[in-house]
Image (cartoon, helix red, strand yellow):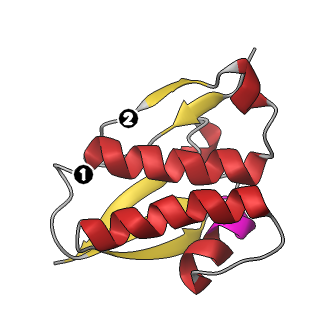
Amino acid sequence: MLPRLGGGDFLRKTVQGTWSPAEANLDISVLEMIAVLLALQAFQDSLSLGTIAVKTDNVSVVWYIIKQEGARSYLLYREALWVWQWELSFNRCLIAMHISRKSKQAKQGHLAALQVVSQ
């Protein structure tokens, strides 16, 4: 069974699906960055202006979002560029927060959770 694609617990709404066979072979950090972008896109009409906290249990994804750089993985960097482009296009500020694998979102199989933290 392919891992689920998780979206945020944003306003108690969830977006999810399954990875294609090609996607399922990607590194988990790349999949989690893709999940961040898909969650942002899915909820973009519901996200108000302000700072959006991206919560993930993946330290690499947190690092790439916070630092807006990275060189260890070309594929992860490429997906991070799409996230940064979304941030600029929709005039939002993203922050990233690491959550424990024991958190509610992680236990539910969500790869990314979104929360508006300020207006």
Quadrant of the rendered image containing residue 23: top right
Pointers 2 and 1 in contact (C-beta within 8 Å): no
Quote the CA–CA distance across marks 2 and 1. Answer: 13 Å
- Which contiguous range is marked in magenta? 56-61
> Badge 2, how many Cα within 10 Å: few under 14, some, many 20+?
some
Determine whether, in the image, residue 35 is placed left or right of residue 101.
Answer: left
Q: Nearer the viewer, residue 48 or 107?
A: 48
Q: Is residue 119 above or below residue 29?
A: below
Determine whether, in the image, residue 116 is placed left or right of residue 109.
Answer: left
Secondary structure under tag 1 reads loop
Report how many numbered discs are placed on residues in the image: 2
Q: Earlier in the sequence, mark 2 or mark 1?
A: 2
Question: Which one is in front in this view, the residue at disc 2 or the one at disc 1?
Answer: 1
Callout 1 amino acid: Gln
Q: Is residue 27 visible?
A: yes
Q: Is residue 4 above or below residue 73?
A: above
Q: Which mark is residue 14?
A: 2
Quadrant of the rendered image containing residue 81: bottom right
Q: Which residue is mark 1?
A: 44
Residue drawn at the location 80% of the way across and 64% of the way down:
73
